[in-house]
Image: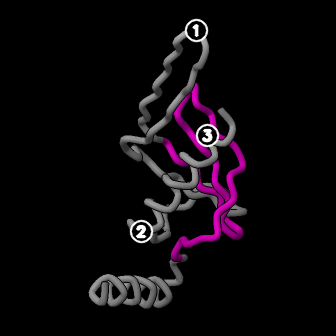
């Protein structure tokens, strides 16, 4: 845990020196498109377009039916600011995990 905090701190300091934003929560879901496996997530002044691979499970037994959804891989994250798409950002892996959890929770609540 200590090494993780040191790494996050080092990334944040390096990003500040280069004026590169470090993306971190809180996050707000703008949309989730399950047909194309893409989600739009707002973080402060930035919008993240998260493209992912997901597994969809469906089951029904006549009386009950349920669906389940799991993101297996984040393929690409595009970040947009007020000027359009930007390549200058830092997205720590812990934040990617938080975003994945948020998308899965949103889909589960709306199934």
Other residues around mark 2 within 10 Å, as few (<14) / some (14–19) / many (≥20): few
**Furthest residue to the left?**
3
Camera-near label (1 vs 2) is 1
In the depicted structure, whether residue 92 falls above or below residue 65: below
Do callouts 1 and 2 mark residues in contact (Cβ within 8 Å)?
Answer: no
Residue that carries the numbered disc 3 in the rendered image: 107
Residue that carries the numbered disc 2 in the rendered image: 94
Q: Quadrant of the N terminus?
A: bottom left
Q: Secondary structure at mark 3?
A: helix
Camera-near label (3 vs 2) is 3
Which of the colour schemes (rainbow, by chain, secondary structure, one colour) is used? one colour
Camera-near label (1 vs 3) is 1
Picture quadrant where residue 4 is located: bottom left
Residue drawn at x 65%, y 32% as measured from the top left: 111
Q: Position of residue 5 (x, y in %)?
A: 36, 87
Q: Would residue 88 appear left or right of 9 to someone viewing this image?
A: right
Q: Secondary structure at mark 1?
A: loop
Question: Which contiguous range is marked in magenta?
Answer: 22-51
Looking at the image, tell me whether mark 1 or mark 2 is earlier in sequence order.
1
Other residues around mark 3 within 10 Å, as few (<14) / some (14–19) / many (≥20): some
**How many angstroms separate mark 1 from mark 2 (CA)?**
41 Å
Looking at the image, tell me whether mark 1 or mark 3 is earlier in sequence order.
1
Q: Would residue 34 appear left or right of 30 to someone viewing this image?
A: left
In the depicted structure, whether residue 4 falls above or below residue 39: below
- Label of residue 62 in the image: 1
Query: Depth check: 1 or 46 in front?
Result: 1
- In reply to whether residue 31 is colored magenta, the answer given is yes
Residue drawn at x 52%, y 34% as measured from the top left: 37
Other residues around mark 1 within 10 Å, as few (<14) / some (14–19) / many (≥20): few
**How many angstroms separate mark 3 from mark 2 (CA)?**
20 Å
């Amino acid at each position: 845990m200590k090494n993780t905090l040191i790494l996050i701190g080092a990334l944040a300091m390096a990003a500040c020196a280069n004026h590169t934003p470090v993306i971190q929560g809180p996050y707000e879901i703008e949309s989730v498109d399950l047909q194309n496996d893409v989600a739009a997530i707002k973080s402060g002044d930035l919008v993240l377009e998260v493209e992912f691979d997901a597994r969809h499970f469906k089951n029904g037994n006549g009386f009950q039916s349920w669906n389940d959804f799991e993101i297996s891989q984040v393929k690409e994250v595009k970040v947009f600011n007020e000027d359009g798409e930007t390549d200058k950002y830092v997205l720590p892996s812990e934040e990617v995990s938080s975003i994945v959890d948020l998308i899965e929770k949103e889909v589960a609540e709306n199934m």
